[in-house]
Image (cartoon, grey):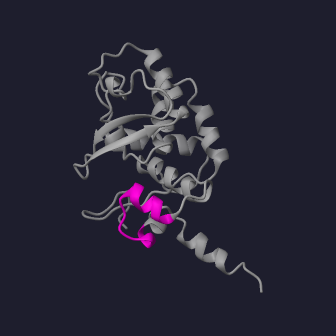
Amino acid sequence: MKKGANFNHPRKGARIKVEPIKTLKDLATIKRLLKDRPRDLAFFVIGINTNLRASDLLAIRAGNVRGLKAMGEIELKEKKTGKLRRISLNGACIDAIKGLLASAPYTDQDFFFRSQRGEVLTVSSASRLVKGWCRTVNLKGNFGSHTLRKTWGYHQRVTFGRSLPELMICLNHSTQRQTLDYLCIQPEEIRSVYENQL
């Protein structure tokens, strides 16, 4: 590698694989870190409680979420696939939404996640935020905006025991192996096979 090259910058056509946040303790620590930053807290909480990509989270407008109650639905057109999706938002999401709506004036047409200049956040800005939060709480690994979606899937499987077929549908994957690899849990599940003693 050339001197001064950015080892974390992918070559053209390559991708950097980000990781989920794997412990509930680390999730709680980041929430505490963000408690006085309503926008960041809402982005983090909605990100780890839904299977939305960052680009879809950033497309949410205030009118999409105003007045929702727990398990209320929003309808979004996925940027990547162009498909219309309905997403239910749990109580944690609703609390974070209420906190952000109370923190600043929003018209129904305003993007929900705005920069300090009032413009919609970009995916690269969101990625920098996530990387910064993870670095601040001393997490080791590679993190970015896609970490939030992976965290949702990881905990659905590991913490809540949801099945791979369910998660394949939620994440729009074609194989269970793809889902295990995506969630960074395949090596853990394979390793656990060898712990079984006869």
Q: Is residue 174 magenta?
A: yes
Residue 59: horizontal and vertical position, in percent?
30, 35
Q: Name, please, the residue furthest toward the bottom.
A: 198
Q: Name, please, the residue furthest toward the right.
A: 198
Q: Name, please, the residue furthest toward the top.
A: 105
Residue 137: horizontal and vertical position, in percent?
61, 42
Residue 14: horizontal and vertical position, in percent?
30, 65
Number of marks in the rendered image: 0
Question: Is 197 above or below relative to 1?
Answer: below
Question: Is 29 above or below relative to 24?
Answer: above
Whether residue 123 is visible: no
Whether residue 117 is visible: yes
Which residue occupies 49% across, 57% down? 19
Which residue occupies 50% across, 44% down? 48
**Where, by quadrant of the figure, is residue 30 drawn?**
top right
Give the extent of the magenta segment. 164-178
Residue 50: horizontal and vertical position, in percent?
45, 44
Looking at this view, is 130 or 195 the one in front?
Answer: 195
Q: Is residue 87 left or right of residue 159?
A: left
Which residue occupies 42% across, 62% down? 168
**Where, by quadrant of the figure, is residue 175 drawn?**
bottom left
